[in-house]
Image (spheres, helix red, strand yellow):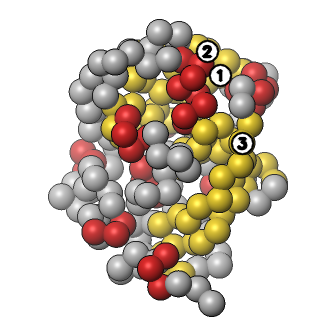
C-alpha cells in the first residue's frame, strides 16, 4: 500500500508520464552533441555523449512532481549523479550555485546544497530504456525534491556560479524554491 506522505499536497498520483515542455523537441545527433561544465570549477570539461556516459554511470530511483499537479512515483533513472560529476570538475569554494543550461535557451539555477542531494542525477535512461526525446532525452536533470521545471530537459551545459541566475520559469513568476511539499509553485 502506498504511503500518502510520498505525494505532496495538491498533487495526485499518475502512472502515465505526461509530456510538457517549452518549444520544439530538439533533434539529437550523437556525433555533434557535447556537454560542458564551466565557471567556478578547477577542471572545466567538454565531453561527447559517449564520454559523458562513461564518467560514472549510476542508477537512482525517485519520485517526480510536476507543478501542474501530478506525481509519478518510483522512477528508475540511469545517468550521472551530480555528486560524481563534482568529483571530476572540482567546484571551487566560491561556487554556491549551478546554472543548468538546456537546448532552446531553457535555464534553471539551483544551490550547490540542493544539487548535492543524493538522488540528483543527469539521466539518459528511464526504466532501463534510453530517455525519449519528449521526456528530455538524450539528457535530463532530475532533482526529485523540486517541481519538475527545475528538472531541465535536453541539458547541454552546467555553469558553477557565486550568485544565483534566475531561470526560464523563475523570470516568469514561478517560485525559485519550487518545493512541492510546501506547494511553492509561484512567487
Q: Tag 2 or tag 3, which sits nearer the N-term?
A: 2
Where does residue 57 sit, x and y in percent of width and height?
74, 37
Q: Name the residue carrying label 1.
A: 34
Residue at (54% x, 17% y) in the render: 89
User: Is the residue 174 above or below the residue 1 in the image?
Assistant: above
Q: Is residue 41 above or below residue 112?
A: above
Which tag is nearer the camera, tag 3 or tag 2? 3
Q: Which residue lies furthest to the right in this view?
A: 128
Callout 2: helix, strand or loop?
A: strand
Within 10 Å of the Cα at label 2, are there few (<14), some (14-19), or many (20+) other Cα atoms? some
Closer to the observer: label 1 or label 3?
Answer: 3
Q: Which residue is drawn at 63% across and 90% down?
A: 1
Q: Which of marks 1 and 2 is nearer the N terminus?
A: 1
Question: 161 and 137: which one is in front?
Answer: 161
Q: Residue at x 61, y 24 (%)?
A: 35
Q: Name the residue rendered at 59%, 44% in the picture.
A: 121
Quarter holding the C terminus is bottom left
Q: In this view, does 170 lie to the left or right of 73?
A: left
**Can you tell which of label 1 and label 2 is closer to the viewer?**
2
Is label 1 in contact with label 2 (beta carbons under 8 Å)? yes
- Residue 172 lies, with reference to residue 155, above or below; the image says below
Residue pointed to by mark 2: 46
- Read off the residue under disc 3: 58
Res 47 quadrant in image: top right
From mark 1 to mark 3, how far is it between C-alphas? 20 Å
Q: Is residue 76 visible?
A: yes
Q: What element carries label 3?
A: strand
Q: Is mark 1 on a helix, strand or loop?
A: strand
User: For residue 161, which quarter of the picture?
Assistant: top left
In the displayed structure image, the side of residue 123 where residue 42 appears, left or right: left
Amino acid at each position: 500500500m502506498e504511503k500518502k506522505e510520498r505525494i505532496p499536497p495538491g498533487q495526485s498520483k499518475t502512472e502515465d508520464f505526461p509530456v510538457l515542455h517549452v518549444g520544439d523537441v530538439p533533434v539529437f545527433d550523437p556525433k555533434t552533441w557535447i556537454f560542458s561544465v564551466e565557471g567556478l570549477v578547477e577542471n572545466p570539461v567538454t565531453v561527447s555523449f559517449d564520454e559523458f556516459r562513461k564518467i560514472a554511470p549510476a542508477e537512482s530511483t525517485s519520485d517526480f512532481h510536476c507543478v501542474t499537479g501530478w506525481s509519478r512515483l518510483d522512477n528508475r533513472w540511469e545517468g550521472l549523479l551530480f555528486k560524481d560529476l563534482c568529483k571530476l570538475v572540482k567546484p571551487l569554494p566560491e561556487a554556491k550555485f549551478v546554472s543548468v543550461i538546456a537546448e532552446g535557451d531553457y535555464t534553471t539555477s539551483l544551490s550547490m546544497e540542493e544539487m548535492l542531494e543524493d538522488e540528483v542525477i543527469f539521466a539518459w535512461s528511464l526504466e532501463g530504456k534510453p530517455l525519449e526525446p519528449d521526456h528530455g532525452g538524450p539528457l535530463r536533470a532530475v532533482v526529485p525534491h523540486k517541481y519538475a521545471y527545475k528538472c531541465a530537459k535536453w541539458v547541454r551545459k552546467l555553469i558553477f556560479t557565486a550568485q544565483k541566475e534566475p531561470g526560464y520559469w523563475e523570470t516568469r513568476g514561478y517560485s525559485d524554491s519550487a518545493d512541492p511539499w510546501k506547494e511553492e509553485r509561484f512567487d
